[in-house]
Image (tube, helix red, strand yellow):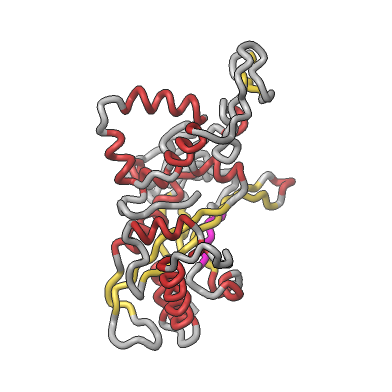
């Protein structure tokens, strides 16, 4: 079956307890930086590995299909036409009618025929709860297919499934191989055949959104969540601190009388701007002499543990991910 479907996989070393994957800046570590477990067995082999399915190989297979390939091209043609239209009365029926897609187009994404859109979704789950087994799934969906087809199994691929038995202690470490492929797709993959089109083409694909429930998104963007001064990026009001580390959320501050439930205005726009920064913008921000003070102030205000992962790791400067 693997030979027939051209299934390409990659194996990555991980911690015995499922805490972390040895990727990125920890690629050469010999011990888990969370629990201290050895990476290798006494025989010198990786104690545990997990498997990733290739998004690039999957896209190539879909594009070569005589039904799905032309459908993806037709959907993106409609997307470009919708983005070029100034008609403000059109129905909002798909992702390409939204403001985010139009901004991506203005930044140079989706400019040519073989440019396609991808969505990722992720969440943790508990299996065999009595035994305490937990894992984390990352699923890709082809947004360039017609709406009635993109939710079917054929247009969705499980990119990875953390082996457990515990929830990842560092989710970012498991996302590195996926981000690396997204960067390759954003820069272009040459020599790809698309059914119904002559010759070999260079395709590009861009991640237009990440979907998950609110705790999962908090994990991805390194938000503190409900323990922070700002609960998360979708509830843009601040709490009043009580004690050392607890926040409560009355409409007005009990001492100063300041309005806490202000979900509009400059602060809300600032939060949205920072969560949606691209890699290039974030690096330019870091070079600013006042960055350190700004970053400390913003972390405290926004309730963030660290820079949002996609802003740091999606290195294609025109890639702007909607989270």
Q: Position of residue 116 (x, y in %)?
A: 41, 69
Is residue 49 inside the magenta stretch?
no
**Magenta span dominant secondary structure:** strand
Position of 273 relative to 112 (above/below): above
Q: Position of residue 271 (x, y in %)?
A: 48, 36
Q: How many marks?
A: 0
The reply to whether residue 232 is in sight is yes
Q: Residue at x 36, y 50 (%)?
A: 314
Q: Residue at x 67, y 14 (%)?
A: 254
Q: Is residue 249 left or right of residue 4?
A: right
Q: Residue at x 28, y 81 (%)?
A: 200
Between 269 and 131, the residue placed more toward the observer is 269
Residue sticking out furthest to the top = 255
Position of 40 relative to 319 (above/below): above
The range drawn in magenta is: 137-142
Position of 62 relative to 173 (above/below): below
Looking at the rendering, which quadrant does residue 180 occupy? bottom left
């Amino acid at each position: 079956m693997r030979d027939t479907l051209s299934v390409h996989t990659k194996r990555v070393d991980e911690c015995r307890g499922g805490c972390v994957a040895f990727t990125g800046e920890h690629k050469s570590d010999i011990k888990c930086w969370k629990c201290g477990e050895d990476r290798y067995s006494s025989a010198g082999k990786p104690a545990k590995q997990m498997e990733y399915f290739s998004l690039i190989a999957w896209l190539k297979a879909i594009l070569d299909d005589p039904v799905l390939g032309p459908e993806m091209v037709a959907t993106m043609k409609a997307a470009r036409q919708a983005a070029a239209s100034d008609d403000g009365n059109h129905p909002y029926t798909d992702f390409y009618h939204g403001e985010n897609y139009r901004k991506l187009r203005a930044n140079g994404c989706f400019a040519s025929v073989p440019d396609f859109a991808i969505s990722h979704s992720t969440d943790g789950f508990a299996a065999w709860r009595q035994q305490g087994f937990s894992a984390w799934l990352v699923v890709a969906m082809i947004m360039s297919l017609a709406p009635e087809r993109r939710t079917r199994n054929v247009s969705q691929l499980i990119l990875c499934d953390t082996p457990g038995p515990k929830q990842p202690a560092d989710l970012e470490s498991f996302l590195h191989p996926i981000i690396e492929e997204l960067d390759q797709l954003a820069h272009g993959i040459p020599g790809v055949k698309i059914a119904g089109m002559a010759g070999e083409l260079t395709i590009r694909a861009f991640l237009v959104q990440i979907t998950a429930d609110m705790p999962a998104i908090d994990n991805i963007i390194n938000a503190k969540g409900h323990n922070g001064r700002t609960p998360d990026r979708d509830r843009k009001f601040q709490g009043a601190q009580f004690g050392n580390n607890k926040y409560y959320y009355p409409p007005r501050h009990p001492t100063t009388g300041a309005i806490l439930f202000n979900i509009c205005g400059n602060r809300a726009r600032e939060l949205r701007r920072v969560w949606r920064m691209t890699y290039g913008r974030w690096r330019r921000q870091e070079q600013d002499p006042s960055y350190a003070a700004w970053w400390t102030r913003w972390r405290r205000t926004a309730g963030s543990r660290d820079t949002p992962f996609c802003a740091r790791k999606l290195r294609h400067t025109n890639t702007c991910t909607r989270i």
